Image (cartoon, rainbow, N blue to C red):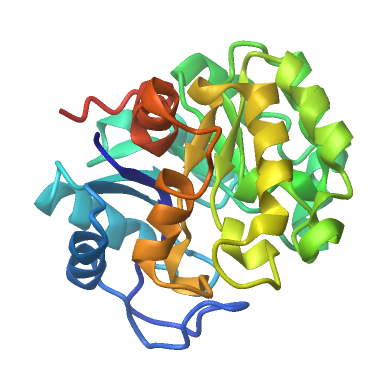
Amino acid sequence: MKIVDAQIHIWSQGMPSGLHRKVASFTAEEALAEMDAAGVDAALIHPPASWDPDSNAQAEAAARAYPERFAVMGQFPPDDPAQRHLIRGWRARPGMKGLRWALLAPEQQAWLRDGTLDWLWPAAEREGLPVATMGGLFLPEFRRIAEAHPGLKLILDHCGLVRTGRDAAAFAQLDELMALAKLPNVAVKATGAPHYSTEPYPYRNLHDGLQRIFDAFGPERFFWGTDITRMPCSYRRCVTFFTEELPWLRGRDLELVMGRGLCDWIGWDLR
């Protein structure tokens, strides 16, 4: 079974935000060493441009150097009209499989309502580029985009849960989240799951909620991953939480969730 992490960050400067490791850099080689120790075959890099403006170029360099280990969900300033042309031929860049903007800040989420990003969704749809975002922060807007652009593949980051919630509070929007599963162009990255629990491994209070999301979206649209530099547990435990501790996840479903489904969704021909 090929194990592919749906989200990691690498960087070479800046101060990491939130709960990410407070280190000056985290290189592709350091990521590979941790992946090898955990039994992870490949990973999808999401450049953390919010703290390292050069991270997109670093991600491309990693994908160029290790094409069987890394691909990229890149980004550029989507609010800058002078850079819109970059979306054309985006997949020709090293390792690029799609686009990702977290849209964490309130002023960035305002772009969803004031027209700033209206150009982006049809452009990505035309280019066949999946787009990932922290849609759990703005589920109504996310749904409107998905419905208006049925040919655009959209990915909800970090299980689509309440970003600041822990335990039951993380699942406060679960019904609204699961309703999105009726839209075939929406998928969920089951990344960062351990962060949502205050319990010790194997985070039993997350099992039921994760199963409900899995049941709604199915194994082809539910992608395991870590966001490892902010996880409260080891990389290996992030793996075994899904491969050993969830009795409802077995066989072909497990293979899809642990990597094959993600590769199919973003068009990563990873042998």
The answer to whether any part of residue 75 appears in the image is: no
The residue positioned 23% from the left and 55% from the top of the image is 39
Q: In which quarter of the image is the N terminus?
A: top left
- Quadrant of image for the C terminus: top left
Report the number of discs: 0
Q: How far from the left and from the top, in percent, is residue 31?
A: 26, 66
Find residue 187 and report its horizontal and vertical position in percent: 59, 28
- Residue 10 x/y as whole percent: 35, 67
Which quadrant of the figure has residue 186? top right
Residue 61 higher or lower than 125, as above or below: below
- In the displayed structure, 44 sits above or below 90; it is below
- Out of 172 and 57, give the one closest to the viewer: 172
The answer to whether residue 216 is visible is yes
- Where is residue 263 shown, x and y percent of the image? 34, 28
Query: Horizontal placement of 261 versus 173: left or right?
Result: left
**Residue at position x 53%, y 43% in the image:** 246
Residue 215 in the figure: left or right of residue 25? right
Identify the residue at image location x=40%, y=88%: 23
Most distant residue in the left direction: 65
Q: Which residue is drawn at 55% across and 67% down?
A: 201
